[in-house]
Amino acid sequence: MEVMEQILPYVDAMNIDLKGFREDYYRKLGGDLDTVKSFIVRAAADCHVELTTLIVPGENDWLDEIEEEAAWIATVDREIPLHVTRFFPRYHMTDREATDIKRVYELADAAGRYLPYVYVGNC
């Protein structure tokens, strides 16, 4: 966090990837959900933040998860835009199909019950 404290005064906006809202998924990806959440809270205190969640079939495509994610984002700042984007199989993740377009819209609609600015991408 020390480097962030030095950099944030010079940053006006950032888009942060919020991969999902389950710790086991973050561990699978080599990260830590609590660390990302702490960074989001800290960044939102000093600059414009937008979040992006790539919806990967079978990993983070459940309604209850996106609802929990959106509800948490609203506690940080209800005005934070959330981009819900469609996954396409590429590079190291070719073991599943692209995210169903209808599912992306369903998840975006669910998040929209908590946040006023939810956008769909890659559809």
Image (tube, rainbow, N blue to C red):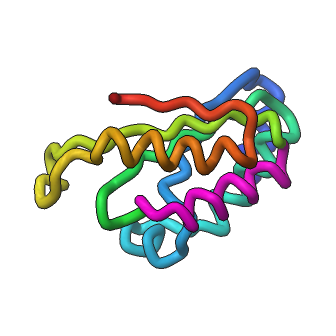
| Residue 70 x/y as whole percent | 68, 52
Left/right of residue 10 with respect to residue 57 in the rendered view: right
Residue 88 appears in which quarter of the rendering?
top left
Considering the image in quadrants, where does the C terminus appear?
top left
Count the marks: 0
Considering the image in quadrants, where does the N terminus appear?
bottom right
Residue in the image at 66% along x and 41% along y: 112
Q: Is residue 56 above or below residue 79?
A: below
Residue in the image at 32% along x and 39% along y: 101
Left/right of residue 97 with respect to residue 110 in the rendered view: left
Most frequent secondary structure within the magenta stretch: helix
| Residue 75 x/y as whole percent | 84, 54
Q: Which residues are magenta?
A: 61-77
Can I make out residue 3 in this image?
no
- For the residue pair 106 and 20, the one nearer the viewer reads as 106
Q: Is residue 34 above or below residue 75?
A: below
Q: Is residue 113 above or below residue 81?
A: below
Residue in the image at 54% along x and 75% along y: 23
Left/right of residue 97 with respect to residue 13 in the rendered view: left
Query: Magenta includes 14?
Result: no
